[in-house]
């Protein structure tokens, strides 16, 4: 009854996150507890040489996700959502959406997964003296310029998918600073796009004679807690096709999945960090000082309130692991045994912990797509062993669990060993941690440090963006974001911690040496064209 009163009074807050394979909506109450949720499965397409999602898939997905949330509310509370206290939109970061003066999308959305921007990223990294990753929005724009794509002259606005959805729901062309930091570098002092680097870019492309300047086509940057507009009448129709939801709902700045992951794990303070592990994976460590030098495997982004963060981003994580679990599901169905996927995952994951710390010599590469950290522009899922390895189910599954965080380890070894970055707490969240203790133990062995997981680990970014929306409308005491999360949301809860054993650390270190030595096999597989 308490949850129904919250919904009927219009005090519930909605967070929606677009992940790579699922769109999820979470409704929270005044105490930040999830009270309803909805979801919709979707997939990217590889069309015309690029990974993309169509506009139809974006809006149909949003509407079906929201409809699923409405159904959850009707089933559990026998009521309808007509008004909300606040809304937040979060989406996987980066990518490229460019629009003309008629607000038309000029080319299909290019997602973070595309790795065709190597030349642009290299040139911009040298120009800015700052690591510009392949997937960042400005790398995409500059690659379009290098490739002579005719649409570039017509660009009047470009943004991320989060910025696009927010724009269509509110009419505001804005972006949260965390997501903006995945478009191009942010100035740590102004917490806005770096003006000197904007000027350097304009000078670089001036010979092309484009009618725009970079500052004119970028979204406005906002910090956590700032009002980012309200739901318009058109926006309400976009979101709720049933027509029940009323316009006028305040929005928080749209954010990327990295920022919402930090919020959902209470990791926005200096010397805290988090790891998000799902279709892709990334670690985020909030820095207390600048790194000694740029590193190609480390991105410098920000928290949703603008603090510098060292990010190690991996394009691949659990997709190959899930595919193998799906194979065991098929075998179970073949035997005529009813399938409970939670049980299948649980049995296979927990059995993996019985394997050898070095996986008995077995190696897996989970590369569904290219992996910039290891220098591969394309991927081929691959399992490698020799006749003398200890080939059994436990080692097989353990090798795939290791593979899901192997590239993450390579990047973080640079951060912790070379840069000597210190961290007080790392919290994990995402699909890898749904089976209690297993992904947590594997990640602890990979990073050589204790890993915490909270009960809300499975809620992920949809809950995180709902918290950011709550921060806009409920932060009456004007607390900093870090203090709001610590004191109001989490109340000092740091979750359950698992520390790695020396044997597990040594085993993972042996495995990663074999993994690195065997990378030429993966490279050969990528070069092979059937």
Image: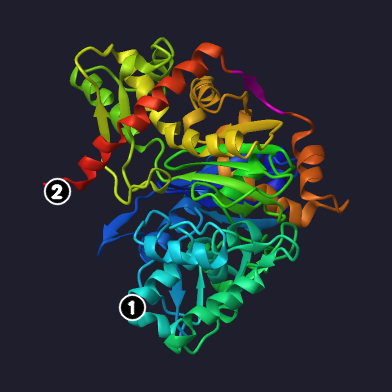
Q: Residue at x 46, y 85 (%)?
A: 102
- Element class at badge 1: loop
Residue 217 drawn at (x, y percent): 55, 78
Q: Is residue 237 above or below residue 179?
A: below
- Tell me: 303 left or right of 57: right
Q: What residue is pinned by disc 1?
A: 149
Q: Are marks 2 and 1 in contact (CB under 8 Å)?
A: no
- 496 part of magenta stretch: yes
- Tell me: 53 left or right of 303: left
Q: Is residue 494 above or below residue 357?
A: below
How far apart are the alpha carbons under marks 2 and 1?
A: 27 Å
Image mark for residue 488: none
Residue 322 drawn at (x, y percent): 34, 32
381, 125: nearer the viewer: 125
Q: Residue furthest right?
A: 477
Q: Locate the N terminus and report the quarter of the image it occupies.
A: top right
Q: Residue at x 48, y 60 (%)?
A: 136
Q: Which residues are magenta?
A: 494-499
């Amino acid at each position: 009854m308490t949850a129904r009163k919250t919904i009927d009074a219009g005090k519930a807050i909605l967070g929606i996150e677009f992940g790579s394979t699922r769109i999820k909506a979470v409704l929270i109450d005044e105490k930040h507890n999830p009270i309803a949720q909805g979801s919709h499965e979707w997939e990217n397409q590889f069309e015309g040489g690029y990974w993309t999602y169509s506009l139809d898939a974006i809006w149909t997905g949003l509407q079906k996700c929201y409809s699923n949330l409405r159904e959850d509310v009707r089933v559990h509370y026998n009521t309808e959502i007509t008004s909300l206290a606040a809304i937040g939109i979060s989406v996987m970061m980066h990518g490229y959406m460019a629009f003309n003066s008629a607000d038309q999308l000029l080319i299909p959305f290019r997602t973070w997964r595309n790795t065709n921007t190597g030349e642009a990223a290299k040139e911009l990294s040298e120009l800015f003296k700052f690591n510009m990753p392949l997937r960042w929005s400005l790398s995409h724009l500059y690659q379009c310029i290098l490739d002579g794509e005719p649409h570039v002259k017509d660009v009047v606005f470009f943004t991320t998918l989060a910025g696009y959805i927010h724009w269509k729901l509110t009419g505001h062309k804005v972006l949260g600073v965390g997501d903006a930091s995945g478009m191009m570098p942010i100035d740590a002092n102004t917490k806005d796009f770096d003006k000197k680097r904007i000027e350097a870019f304009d000078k670089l492309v001036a010979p092309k004679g484009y009618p725009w300047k970079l500052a004119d086509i970028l979204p406005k940057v906002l910090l956590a807690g700032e009002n980012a507009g309200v739901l318009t009448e058109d926006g309400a129709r976009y979101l709720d096709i049933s027509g029940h939801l009323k316009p006028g709902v305040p929005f928080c700045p749209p954010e990327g999945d990295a920022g919402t992951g930090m919020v959902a794990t209470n990791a926005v303070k200096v010397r805290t960090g988090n790891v998000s592990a799902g279709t892709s994976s990334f670690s985020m460590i909030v820095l207390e000082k600048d790194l000694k030098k740029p590193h190609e495997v480390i991105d410098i982004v920000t928290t949703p309130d603008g603090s510098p963060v060292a990010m190690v981003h991996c394009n691949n994580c659990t997709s190959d692991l899930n595919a193998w679990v799906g194979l065991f599901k098929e075998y179970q169905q073949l035997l005529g045994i009813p399938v409970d996927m939670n049980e299948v995952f649980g049995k296979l994951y927990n059995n993996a912990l019985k394997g050898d710390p070095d996986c008995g010599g077995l190696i897996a590469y989970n590369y569904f797509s290219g992996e910039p950290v290891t220098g591969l522009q394309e991927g081929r899922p691959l399992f490698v062993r020799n006749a003398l390895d200890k080939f059994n189910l436990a080692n097989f599954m353990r090798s795939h669990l290791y593979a899901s965080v192997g590239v993450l380890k390579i990047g973080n070894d640079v951060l912790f060993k070379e840069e000597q970055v210190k961290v007080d707490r790392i919290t994990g969240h995402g699909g890898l941690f749904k089976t209690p203790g297993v992904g947590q133990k594997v990640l602890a062995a990979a990073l050589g440090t204790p890993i915490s997981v909270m009960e809300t680990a499975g809620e992920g970014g949809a809950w995180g963006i709902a918290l950011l929306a709550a921060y806009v409308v409920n932060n009456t005491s004007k607390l900093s974001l870090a203090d709001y999360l610590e004191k109001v949301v989490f109340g000092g809860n740091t979750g359950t911690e698992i520390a790695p054993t020396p044997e597990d650390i040594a085993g993972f270190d042996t495995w990663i040496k074999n993994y690195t030595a065997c990378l030429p096999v993966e490279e050969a597989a990528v070069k092979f064209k059937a």
